[in-house]
Amino acid sequence: MVFFAGVARKKHHIFPRFTAIPKEPLRGMFGRVMTQDLFSSHSNRGAAVLSFLGITLIFALAYTQSPLYTSNQNQYFLHGLARVGYGSLHLDWLANTLDPTPVFTTLVELTYRLFHLPEIHYLYYAFIMGIYAWSLIGIVETVYPVRRSNTIFLVFFALLIVAHSAGLRLALSRLLGTNWAYVLEDGLADQRLLGPVLQPSAFGAFLLLSIYLFLRGHAGWAVLSAALAATVHPTYLLSAAALTLSYMLITFMADRRLPRPAMLGAVALVAVLPILIYTYTSFAAPSPESSEQARHILVDYRIPHHALIDWWFDATAVVKIALVAVALLLIRRTQLLIIMLVCSLIAASLSLVQWLTQSDFLALIFPWRLSTFLVPLATALILGFAVTTVFMRFPDWMRRYEKIIRALCMAAILLALLAGGLRLWLDFARQQASEDRPVMAYLAAQGDPTAVYLIPVKMQDFRLAAQAPAYVDFKAIPYRAADVLEWRHRIELAEHFYKQKECAVLDEIAAQGGVTHVVLPAENFGMTCPQLTSLYRDDYYEVSRYESP
């Protein structure tokens, strides 16, 4: 189709004076490879692929990952691992609830079936990080000439790496507090594209790729890229819709005709239709009352840090909004302005409506989630503007100290890589030294195919580390209304047992959830329940078999 060729557009930059920056001959391997772009007609395709791989390797090592299975992975990997017979997870209650991210689950399942090597997920995430970094660089290059010379690109690339490095996050968290760790890259409400682990939200990097593809004239592929992000993680449906709307508006403004914008919208709708149908038919509540109760539990009890503006709006939110505002000012004469402005206005207006109405339904749509790609894009644009402006205003000074500048950039990248490697090593060491690792290793080795465990609700790593089903935990949650209500009831029972230390509640828990074993933390060691027979004990946890009276 013709629309895949892109949209007609005029070539212009925010400040014409940037064209005064001389384009230097590309010297050395770095210049010939790292400054190549796959969508430029002047680039060598082989070198462009090497450029992507180089950017991916450096960025992924500096950003780093946490070990499998950490944090949200205990929820998003559960369904896929249960399907392939990982331990006895097929008996787990949560693994048998409706899956909110079926495409990601299929990826996990196929990976395990084909390779039996979970570590491949590290490569998947590194690739996604590469998409993220490469797209940011490409978008900035459409506005500022960051690829005009080796030195300009090296300075910009070094700043981009440092801004996303594990080392900077550690420094910010130590100096300013943990809320500031991701201030230059994550969106509002503690939501972000990347993060320490691979999970469905990481596919939001394809939203940035979508913007890049559109700016390079590939409108059709742009909407498909946005649709991919929404298909893997349905909470990106609003983001994909906002981007598609901005593309349609720009396309219409180019030739004042409706067919091509309408075609873009149709392609986007068809692409997301499967996940739309799945989400609606699977998670629509049978009654308004149960739906309202479930939304209230999620918004006010489980995820207020994501869903309540009064909860997450703080100084870091002000900084992130300011970053986006500055970027909008800088790109005011470019097509990118329309894309970012449309997305910003949609996010701001819907967020205001949610705050005024206190709608739980709108809160769970997360209109502020559009900031997850707006904030890192704003950071990259500000860096691109700063670098090119300095090189334009002080060309003689920059040439005089070029070797020193390049050496400092290489040193910064090297330090970021070292910090990333150190962070990865520390995370692995911290995981292995965790107090709950011995008991989970013991249970994984036992491999009891019929056991179902009652565990402390904050023991979030239990299922995948022990390869065993759990009655409930606080971290991993279902999303269908009836299951959310069931999850809340289970949490109440489990907390009652551990906090009130009442043995009688065990019988209700066992009857409801098929519990056969109980994991007791050290503070519960004094309990003498007649239903429990101790099987294992260390300094921190005890495992007992439950027998009905």
Image (cartoon, rainbow, N blue to C red):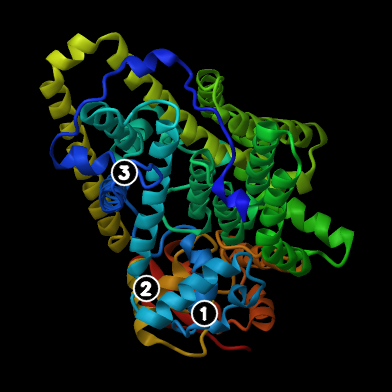
Q: Is residue 49 above or below residue 464?
A: above
Q: Which residue is mark 3?
A: 43
Which marked residue is nearer to the observer: mark 3 or mark 1? Answer: 3
Image position of 269 (left or right of 466): right
Q: Which residue is mark 1?
A: 82
Q: Position of residue 528 (x, y in %)?
A: 52, 75
Indicate the quadrant containing the N terminus: top left, top right, bottom left or bottom right: bottom right
Tag 2 or tag 1, which sits nearer the N-term? 1
Q: Which residue is mark 2?
A: 439
Tag 3 or tag 2, which sits nearer the N-term? 3
Image position of 96 (left or right of 392): right
Crowding around mark 1 (Cα neighbors within 10 Å: few <14, some 14 to 19, many 20+) is many
Residue drawn where x is 55% and y is 59% of the image = 475
The answer to whether the residues at label 2 and label 3 have Cβ atoms under 8 Å apart is no
Q: Position of residue 211 (x, y in %)?
A: 53, 41
Q: CA distance from mark 3 to mark 1?
A: 46 Å
